[in-house]
């Protein structure tokens, strides 16, 4: 598996400051009460409370980055001195900085769904167990990588559903919210079945094939459009994909016919893609260029692609950028990280509509005899599994050590492509169609009701 600098960066302080103030308070309280950290054990669930707009399911992504963070994060002398000098920590014992932080490592147990699995609101997609300080500190980074990659993977899945037989390329780096977000957008979209990316870092670090054509500036640099095509062809030959919409799309299509089938394709990046594609295909076929592919870009999303396909436009490949890398129609996913047990005692959160199911739980997926999804069943971990079911939370880390063979990116994609076949088509519609109802076990519901009564 490729890891590279993406998984080697020490991101220990990529967190919210209150994680550190809470953590230091936990340490100080344990110190004053002569309590060992191993007697201060918390369990947190990661889950999503509600769908983003127009979504009927979500795709879990970001596990690999979450795990590498938990393995690599350390407090360096620089970060320790930074915290020591913050006024807010003046009452924290010096041993917190000199001994605890200097030797810190995440000593956590982690369960999670497999990357590429589909899931629904209120289902735990990850469970983290360990000393309170450590489990608390992990929250911000885990939510960051999981929220972002999951929202992009879910968007990419919608696009893949609409165009299962087309070449799909992620082109969103220049519009992503940071350079690193561009890399993770490429990763998340690849998980959901995309064929490649324009992002070169995603290629060298993650092994996702990067490719590209040319910009309009390449055409404009030369006095004549055909001169730019000739120069490009002389260099790249059969790998050439000519951008033909700088001036007149159809006239440019006529010009590139001189190369016959010795170029890969042409790209259209503006205008009425349906009309242009039909005209360009006729021109290419008429001039003996039937093997030349048509690639389309230009602010594409699942709705525009569906319209293109429904109108039988002869487009072979789509480059999707802004709409995908930012999940533009709903760019956020509000996955949360909630305490569900402390020192063996179930905990619950209730505030208006924000209720958290307490205790250690397992989510079971029930399928029919053909393996098609029927329902998910949320149960307490010690309850017997339902028949014809699969436990979705699997052990990933134990006491900070990786016990799961993290799959490579191609293996994750293969799992997604097979797994998504088991999701009925009603869930894959582009409009909201929330037919899923999470089934809750009787024991879990009774525990929830009991804790509610105690609080009120």
Image: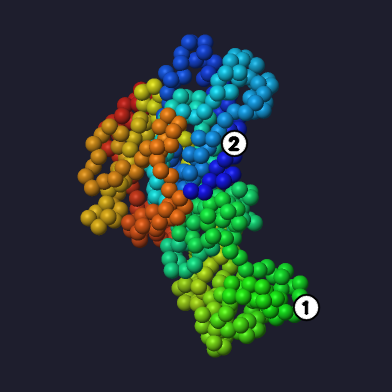
In the picture, the disc for residue 21 is: none
Query: Relative to 150, is 130 above or below?
Result: above
Q: Position of residue 326 (x, y in %)?
A: 57, 53
Query: Relative to 341, is 27 above or below?
Result: above
- Give whichever of 232, 393 is nearer the camera: 232
Horizontally, residue 104 falls left or right of residue 455, namely: right
**Residue ID for mark 1:** 223
Q: Position of residue 205 (x, y in %)?
A: 56, 51
Q: Quadrant of residue 234?
A: bottom right
The reply to whether residue 327 is visible in this rendering is no
Nearer-N-terminus badge (1/2):
2
Nearer the viewer's eye, disc 1 or disc 2?
A: 2
C-alpha separation, residue under disc 1 versus residue under disc 2: 50 Å
In the image, farthest residue toward the right: 223
**Residue ID for mark 2:** 10
Residue shown at the point (57%, 40%) measured from the top left: 8
Q: Position of residue 238 (x, y in %)?
A: 58, 75
Residue shown at the point (65%, 16%) measured from the top left: 90
Graded by Cα atoms within 10 Å as few (under 14), some (14 to 19) or many (20 or more), the crowding at tag 2 reads: some
Q: How many labels were placed on the picture?
A: 2
């Amino acid at each position: 598996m490729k890891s590279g600098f993406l998984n080697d960066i020490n991101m220990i302080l990529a967190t919210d400051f209150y994680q550190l103030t809470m953590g230091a308070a936990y340490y100080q309280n344990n110190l004053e009460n002569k309590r060992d950290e191993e007697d201060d054990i918390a369990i947190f669930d990661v889950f999503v409370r509600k769908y983003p707009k127009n979504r009927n399911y979500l795709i879990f992504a970001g596990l690999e980055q979450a795990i590498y963070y938990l393995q690599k994060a350390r407090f360096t002398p620089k970060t320790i001195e930074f915290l020591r000098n913050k006024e807010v920590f003046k009452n924290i014992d010096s041993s917190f900085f000199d001994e605890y932080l200097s030797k810190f490592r995440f000593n956590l147990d982690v369960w999670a769904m497999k990357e590429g699995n589909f899931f629904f609101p209120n289902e735990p997609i990850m469970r983290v167990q360990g000393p309170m300080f450590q489990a608390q500190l992990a929250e911000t980074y885990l939510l960051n990588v999981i929220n972002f990659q999951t929202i992009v993977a879910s968007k990419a899945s919608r696009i893949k559903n609409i165009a299962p037989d087309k070449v799909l390329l992620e082109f969103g780096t220049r519009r992503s919210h940071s350079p690193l977000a561009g890399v993770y957008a490429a990763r998340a979209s690849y998980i959901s079945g995309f064929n490649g990316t324009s992002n070169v870092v995603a290629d060298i670090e993650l092994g996702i094939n990067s490719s590209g054509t040319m910009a309009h500036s390449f055409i404009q640099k030369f006095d004549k459009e055909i001169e730019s095509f000739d120069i490009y062809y002389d260099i790249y030959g059969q790998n050439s994909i000519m951008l033909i919409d700088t001036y007149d799309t159809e006239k440019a299509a006529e010009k590139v016919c001189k190369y016959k089938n010795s170029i890969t394709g042409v790209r259209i990046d503006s205008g009425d893609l349906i009309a242009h594609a039909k005209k360009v295909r006729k021109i290419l076929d008429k001039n003996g260029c039937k093997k030349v592919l048509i690639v389309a870009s230009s602010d594409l999303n699942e709705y525009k692609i569906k319209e293109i396909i429904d109108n039988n436009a002869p487009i072979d490949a789509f480059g999707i950028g802004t709409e995908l890398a930012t999940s533009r129609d709903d760019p956020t996913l509000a996955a949360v990280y909630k305490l569900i047990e402390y020192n063996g005692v179930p905990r619950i959160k209730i505030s208006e509509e924000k209720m958290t199911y307490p205790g250690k739980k397992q989510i079971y997926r029930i399928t029919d005899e053909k393996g098609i999804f029927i329902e998910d069943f949320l149960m307490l971990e010690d309850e017997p599994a339902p028949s014809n079911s699969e436990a979705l939370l699997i052990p990933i880390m134990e006491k900070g050590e990786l016990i799961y063979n993290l799959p490579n990116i191609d293996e994750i994609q293969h799992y997604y492509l097979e797994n998504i076949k088991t999701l009925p088509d009603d869930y894959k519609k582009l409009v909201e169609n929330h037919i899923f109802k999470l089934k809750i076990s009787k024991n879990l519901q009774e525990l929830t009701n009991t804790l509610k009564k105690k609080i009120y």
